[in-house]
Amino acid sequence: MKAIAIGHSTYDTTIITDTYPIENLKYRLPSSITCSGGPASNAAYLLAKWNMDTTIASLVGNDYYGKLIKKDFDQIKANTNYFELKNKHETDSSYIIANTSNGSRTILTCKDGKKYDRLDFDIKDKYDLILVDGEHYKTAEKVLERNNQAISVLDAGRLCDETRKLGKLVTYVVCSKDFAEDFTMKDLDKIDINTLKEVHDDIASYFETNVIITLEANGSFTKINDEYKLIPSIEVESVDATGAGDIFHGAFLYFIGNNYPLEESIKLASIAGAISVTRIGSRNSIPTLEEVLDTAGYDQLI
């Protein structure tokens, strides 16, 4: 199986605290953690870490942080033929406040709003599995159209024109609670099955494809064989939720690509995401395939 992830890469600095900062005070904190990040980037790293033939298509600056991100992929033996280090482009950076008392994370991402570069590769290679996150729309669109028999996933983390368009080209729209709320203007803070059904159907009607709504600690909601299903996650003590959604998407694509049933793929992806929130830092928190299978009670892949 050959996979490609097309989208955003950042370099993350995670500041660890046991309370959310109050404005206009000074804090001395024991440590911070730095690592690569970004939705498609984290998913690609998971797939490569799990020994899948994986290509990452992304754009960073030809700078210190961009080279660190590429080095991470080279070390995990991902294909970086379409990973561009661009001169006069600054690698995006994210600053994350991880509140270990409740597992919340606040993410501030710095992007140059005046100049936004996009990938200009014409990717003609064939792939079995595709993940896109809305970044580099034209490249993602061409790859999806040229590989229309592939299993494809949209990481729908934010509502924008690009995710609206790409969602019509993929096999699965896997959207966050925030995306679902923004799309439908309905509140999902309380897990009400009737509201979830309405939200799911509104999104599925628009995209005309399979829809999975991730609900963080409350699991995931989807429809399988005309039956609505709220699929629970496992209970863990969360210290940092950064990257948990990215890890869910990568793991879901891995399992669905390896012919696991849809419900089982969601359960296993939820386990991968749940394990990750017990650790600090997005890239650092990606579990091994063996950890996920052991937690699920499997001796090996089905």
Image (cartoon, rainbow, N blue to C red):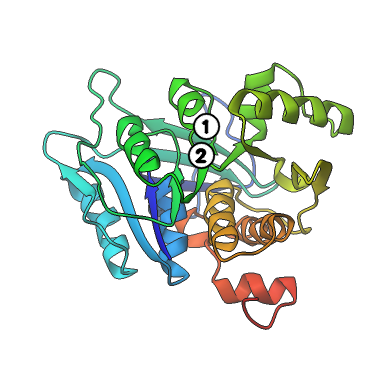
Tell me where residue 228 appears, x and y as whole percent. 83, 41
Quarter of the figure with the C terminus: bottom right
Quarter of the figure with the N terminus: bottom left
Label 2 crowding class (10 Å Cα cut-off): few <14, some 14-19, many 20+? many
Label 1 crowding class (10 Å Cα cut-off): few <14, some 14-19, many 20+? many
Tell me where residue 5 appears, x and y as whole percent. 39, 49
Residue that carries the numbered disc 2 in the rendered image: 170
Residue at position x 76%, y 54% in the image? 233
Tell me where residue 172 appears, x and y as whole percent. 58, 42
In the picture, residue 197 is in which quadrant? top right
Residue that carries the numbered disc 1 in the rendered image: 167
Q: Is residue 206 at all visible to an observer of this figure? A: yes
Q: Is residue 32 at all visible to an observer of this figure? A: no
Q: Give the residue type at disc 2.
A: Val
Q: Quick one: which residue is furthest to the front in this view?
A: 149
In this rendering, is residue 265 above or below 95? below
Q: Nearer the viewer, residue 166 or 77?
A: 166
In this rendering, is residue 107 above or below 38? above
Q: Give the residue type at disc 1.
A: Gly
In the picture, residue 111 is in which quadrant? top left
